[in-house]
Image: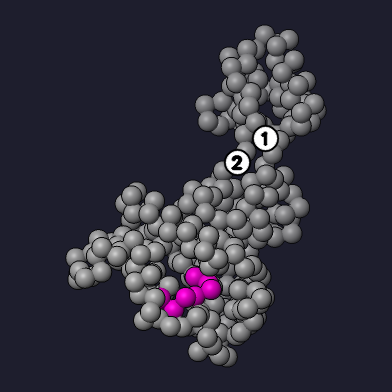
C-alpha cells in the first residue's frame, strides 16, 4: 500500500524511425493531483497507454504501485466489491437522481461523469484521466473540476492530462511538461510558477523611451513590449533605480507591479520555439533565464 503510484524510468516508444516517447522519467506520489502536459503529438496519450499496459514500451520501465502493467496486466490495483459501491459512486459523481434513466438521454457531461463512476466502482487508488473536460460546456467543466478535487480529497491519486492550463493551475500540485516525447520540466507547480519571480509589468507615459532606458540599466533584463506596456526582469534594487531614472527623464509611471507568469505562458515558452530547455536547465534556470 506504501508503493509509489506511478514511476516511469527512461520510458521510450518508437514506431519505426519515429520516436513518440523519448526517455521519459516521472514520479507520481501518493495523494498527488499530477498534471501531464504537452502539445498535440508530444507523446502524452502514448505514455498513458504504456502506463495502462495497453501498448508495450520499446525501452524503459513503468511501475504502478511497484507492479509492471505489461508483465502483469491483471494486477489488482483496486479494492474490489464493485456491486456494493454502485450507489455510493453515483452519489459521488452526482448522478443518483438519474440512476434509473437510460444513458442515451444523458448529456455529454453526465456521460463523462458516468465514465468516472465506472472507474470508481472498484475503489481505485489511482485514476488516469485523459482530457476529462473535452467537449464540456463551462458548467460541465466546473462540475468535472469539482469532482476531481473531491476525489483527491478522498485520498485518490490523480494523473491528469489536459490542454487547459487554467484547469491544471486550479487542480494540480505537481506537473510534467513534455515536448516531442521528452520531459522539459517535472516537479512542483508552485515552484515552477515561483521561478518567474522578479518579473514586472511597467506602463508609462512614453513606453518607447522607457524601454530604451530600462535596457541600459544594470540589473534589468529581458525588456519586452507586452500587454499594453512593458515587461522586464529585475531585482528590487534595480527596480528602485529604474523608477528614479524614469522620473529624472520626465517619464511618468502609470504602473509598475510584480508579474508572475501564468502556467500557460510558461507552457508556451517551454514547448514552442527552436529548442526547449533540458529538464535540468529548466529547473536550474527557472525556465525564463
Upstream in the sequence, badge 2 or badge 1?
A: 1
The span picked out in magenta is 121-127
Colour option used: one colour
Label 2 sits on residue: 261
* Badge 2 element: loop
In this view, the residue in front, 227 or 69, is 69
Question: Residue 8 location, x and y as percent?
Answer: 63, 74
Residue at the spot 59% in from the left edge and 64% down from the top edge:
31
Inspect this view and state whether residue 180 appears.
no
- Asked if the residues shown at circle 2 and circle 1 are in contact, with their CB atoms under 8 angstroms apart, the answer is yes
Question: Residue 124 location, x and y as percent?
Answer: 49, 75
Question: Residue 204 location, x and y as percent?
Answer: 60, 18
Q: CA distance from mark 2 to mark 1?
A: 8 Å
Label 1 sits on residue: 199
Left or right: residue 211 versus residue 95 is right
Residue at the spot 46% in from the left edge and 67% down from the top edge:
129
Residue at the spot 29% in from the left edge and 65% down from the top edge:
96
Residue at the spot 38% in from the left edge and 69% down from the top edge:
89
Disc ID at residue 282 = none
Q: Quadrant of the N terminus?
A: bottom right
* Badge 1 element: strand
Left or right: residue 100 versus residue 112 is left
Majority SS type along the magenta span? loop
Question: Residue 125 location, x and y as percent?
Answer: 53, 73
Amino acid at each position: 500500500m506504501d508503493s509509489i503510484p506511478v514511476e516511469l524510468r527512461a520510458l521510450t516508444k518508437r514506431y519505426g524511425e519515429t520516436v513518440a516517447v523519448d526517455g521519459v522519467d516521472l514520479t507520481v506520489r501518493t495523494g498527488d493531483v499530477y498534471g501531464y502536459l504537452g502539445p498535440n503529438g508530444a507523446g502524452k496519450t502514448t505514455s498513458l497507454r504504456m502506463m495502462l499496459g495497453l501498448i508495450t514500451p520499446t525501452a524503459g520501465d513503468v511501475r504502478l504501485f511497484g507492479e509492471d502493467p505489461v508483465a502483469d496486466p491483471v494486477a489488482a490495483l483496486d479494492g474490489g466489491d464493485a456491486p456494493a459501491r454502485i450507489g455510493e459512486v453515483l452519489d459521488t459523481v452526482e448522478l443518483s437522481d438519474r440512476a434509473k434513466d437510460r444513458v442515451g438521454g444523458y448529456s455529454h457531461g453526465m456521460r463523462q461523469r458516468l465514465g468516472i463512476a465506472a472507474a470508481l466502482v472498484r475503489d481505485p487508488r489511482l485514476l488516469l484521466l485523459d482530457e476529462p473536460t473535452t467537449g464540456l460546456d463551462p458548467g460541465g467543466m466546473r462540475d468535472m473540476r469539482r469532482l476531481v478535487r473531491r476525489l483527491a480529497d478522498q485520498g485518490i491519486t490523480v494523473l491528469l492530462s489536459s490542454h487547459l492550463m487554467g484547469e491544471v493551475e486550479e487542480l494540480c500540485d505537481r506537473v510534467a511538461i513534455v515536448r516531442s516525447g521528452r520531459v522539459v520540466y517535472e516537479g512542483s507547480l508552485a515552484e515552477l510558477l515561483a521561478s518567474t519571480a522578479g518579473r514586472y509589468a511597467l506602463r508609462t507615459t512614453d513606453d518607447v523611451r522607457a524601454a530604451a532606458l530600462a535596457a541600459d540599466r544594470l540589473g534589468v533584463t529581458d525588456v519586452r513590449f507586452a500587454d499594453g506596456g512593458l515587461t522586464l526582469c529585475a531585482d528590487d534594487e534595480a527596480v528602485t533605480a529604474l523608477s528614479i531614472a524614469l522620473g529624472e527623464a520626465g517619464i511618468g509611471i502609470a504602473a509598475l507591479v510584480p508579474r508572475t507568469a501564468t502556467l500557460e505562458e510558461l507552457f508556451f515558452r517551454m514547448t514552442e520555439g527552436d529548442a526547449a530547455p533540458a529538464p535540468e536547465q529548466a529547473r536550474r534556470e527557472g525556465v525564463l533565464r
